[in-house]
Amino acid sequence: MRTLEFLASRLGKAVLVVIGVVVLNFLLIQLAPGDPAAVLAGEAGAGDELYLAQLREQFGLDRPLHVQLLSYLGNVLSGDLGYSYRNQVPVLELIADRLPATLLLTGSAFVFSLVLGVLLGILAASRRGTAADTVIMTGALVFYATPLFWIALMAVLVFSIYLPWLPPFDMETIGAGYTGWRRALDIAHHLVLPTVTLGLFFTATYARITRASMLEVMSLDFVKTARAKGVQQGRIIRRHVLRNAILPVFTLASVQAGQLVGGAVLTETVFAWPGIGRLMFDALFQRDYPVLLGVFLVTAIMVVLVNLAADLLYRIVDPRIETAA
Amino acid sequence: MRDTTKRLLAATAILALGLVPAAAQGSAEEPRAGGVLNMIAQPEPPMLMVGLNTQGPTLYVGGQIYQSLLTYGQNLEVLPSLAKAWTVSDDGLTYTFTLEDDVRWHDGEPFTSADVVFTADAFLREAHPRWRHIATTYVDSIEAPDEQTVVFRLSKPFSAFIYAFELSSFPVVPRHIYEGTDYRTNPANQTPIGTGPFKLQEWRRGSYIHLVRNEDYWKEGLPLLDELYFRIIPDSASRAVAFERGSVDVLRGGDVEGFEVRRLSGLPDAQTTTEGWEMYSPVVFLQMNLREPPFDDVRIRKAVMHALDRDFIVENVFFGLGEPATSPIASTTRFHSEDTVAYPYDLDEAKRLVEEAGLDAQAHPVRLMPLPYGSQWDRLAEYVKQQLEDIGLVVDIRGVDPGGWSQALSEWDFDVTFNFTYQYGDPALGVARHYLSSNIIKGTPFGNNQGYDNPRVDELFLEAAGAVDLQEAADAYAEAQTILTDEVALGWLFEMRNVTIMRDDVRNLVRTGIGVNEAMDEVWLDR
């Protein structure tokens, strides 16, 4: 019962947060210089007064700001995210087209970094002070500190150009016309470089957090007791230490999960991945307000939902935590 | 081997008879049908409807779908496209076009003179700023006496009129789809219907645009290629990799950074050409706001011209991909004059001019706004800053994104910036707009934004545009060029030389003055 109450009150707040985000975004965007009509005219290298006026009228930019805001809010509440100024396609359609690609990429990177990061963290903690620990921690430090785009470029250079093992960009082989399993394999092949690139930073973070948290737990009395009882080392690590040490990792994972939608702009650019991050980036430069607001909205909803899910999951991960409303 | 010999013999025979046009590339080989050509659309175009959007990539892809009445050769000679013949009356007032027969739109409807009249009188008049200007100023009536004929009657002669029918200025649109609709929001803009050699098969936004052969194309036996792919690759390093690895066959000018051009041109299986831009001939210029100090003083503007080493800019900032400009009219455009005021690189002269002007540089710091189109333009801004500071000006670089640039330019909120302009074959179409005082309009980005106002120049441009005799036009344009260079209305820097890089087995890609925007109906692959 308490869970249900908690859920209802959190959902109510979530709706308010999302509306707040929409209003704030709408107003923030207006602060950027230049409007979509000017950008379109600029790109075309031409544009007289009438052309600009026609565009502004078509986009509804000639109306007062509060009218635009209210009409946008009304449309959003009725599920209509508007038309892209630039592409003249419904925003919802553009987002729906791009969302799966991004979720596939960020989802893979999430799983990759979580699994690999935690495994490396455990390995380092359980072999503390050995060569393996040093290698893992040095690697983690390097990838934690290296900019993403540089890793991406180097990965392409090494694995696509010097060693032609992996495709350097695109989501699938264009024009090959693969279907079924062949296509899935093809996409998986294309997925490797962007996933690793995107996932390395979080892998490093998970490894460090897991190790630190495990070392802390390992020094606690109940671990000594277990060891004194003669429990095997592997079992101690799995059942006693890891379970108690996983909470900070979980918190961090929920942060990463919140970035599932908007966190891959750079990776998508370098690897020509047709995702939503790239859509947002382009829309920003083109002042394509409806698309930009649409992506922000989807991102905000995603973050709110992930946070909610994380709060609920805490109880399962660590039953000692009460879901206080 | 014997085959080759035979083919060579045949080719020699044809050459001897003078049947092969000299410009035809790879004319000694027999074209082969079939194959897929991979290209890059950068940046991804917003739409493919050329009548509503005239951005570079839109023309590149859309030029395979839509066609215009005429096209233009590399020496700007007028060539047939949808119009197979045309006549101009002696008084320069009546233009009669005879259309190709048996042309069908991609949806099977016949193409007729009614489509052309609708395009000229309704669609482009409403949606296309450049055509609207021509139509409003010069065109009296557009009529279709029969299905194959269109007659334009002008209210006064316009010496550039025959150049107004290029793809980006006059793409013919289907009347049966657009008549009576709101052109900009017509859903058909997503499923373009043209008369061109290729049809849109699929557009996966963010991935690729896929065009396939138009089986009912009006030129017998063409197009030769089966499919075209335009890939979307947002990162310029990745675009270079794509060519290197063979995923794409063609790099259009601007697809990769200047420093990659040299490297990729040197690949063993690559060929390059700088041809195919004659109709556009982009000229890069420095735009100084003439309304405020320091650039309201012509001596300061002359000093700036002397302070910039344009050979250095071309060689080092733009990797040799250009020619220093000497006039507002590009050397490949009609009526270009060599008889202009020259500004050789001379720092001493520049400093002398600044001193003579008695400028208080501290009181008038210069806001320099780079063109937000990538690193080469940033380097150009840095070079200009350095040179201007050398002659005593105070310069502050203000970086902006394209939206901010467009707005600052429109609102005249800048001291100096860069831009480049397409010439469209005739000064009246691409050049005059930057100097006519009637084009000083706040709120639009591509007019006379520097605020240049000289009644004599206005008069000369008007006279040249209205001339029936081409010599008259040439004289007027020559005088205008002398005045404009003397007064430094804009600071001409250089003419861009865009390089098209392609696989060495791509044939016939660049055949006319609009280059890769030309319908690729005769393009074939020797593989």
Image: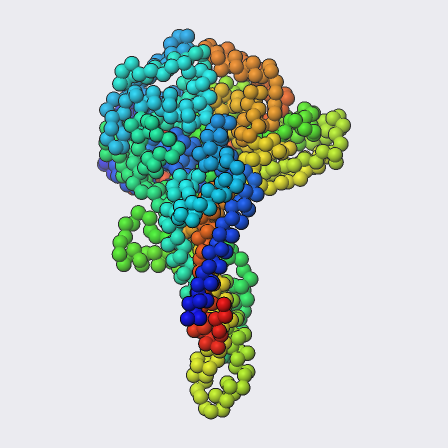
Q: Is residue A270 visible?
A: no
Quick check: B9 above or below A245?
A: above
Determine the residue positioned at 44% across, 71% down: A2
Determine the residue positioned at 45% across, 73% down: A315
Determine the residue positioned at 65% across, 26% down: B291
Instruction: Classify the position of the C terminus of chain B by image quarter.
Output: top left
Q: Is residue B420 visible?
A: yes
Front residue (pair A245, B298)? A245
Q: Quadrant of residue B140?
A: top left
Quick check: B264 above or below B453?
A: below
Determine the residue positioned at 55% across, 83% down: A219
Q: Position of residue B479 (x, y in %)?
A: 57, 15
Q: Position of residue A187 (x, y in %)?
A: 34, 56
Q: Quadrant of residue B204?
A: top left
Quick check: B181 above or below B90?
A: below
Is B8 positioned to the left or the right of A8 in the image? left
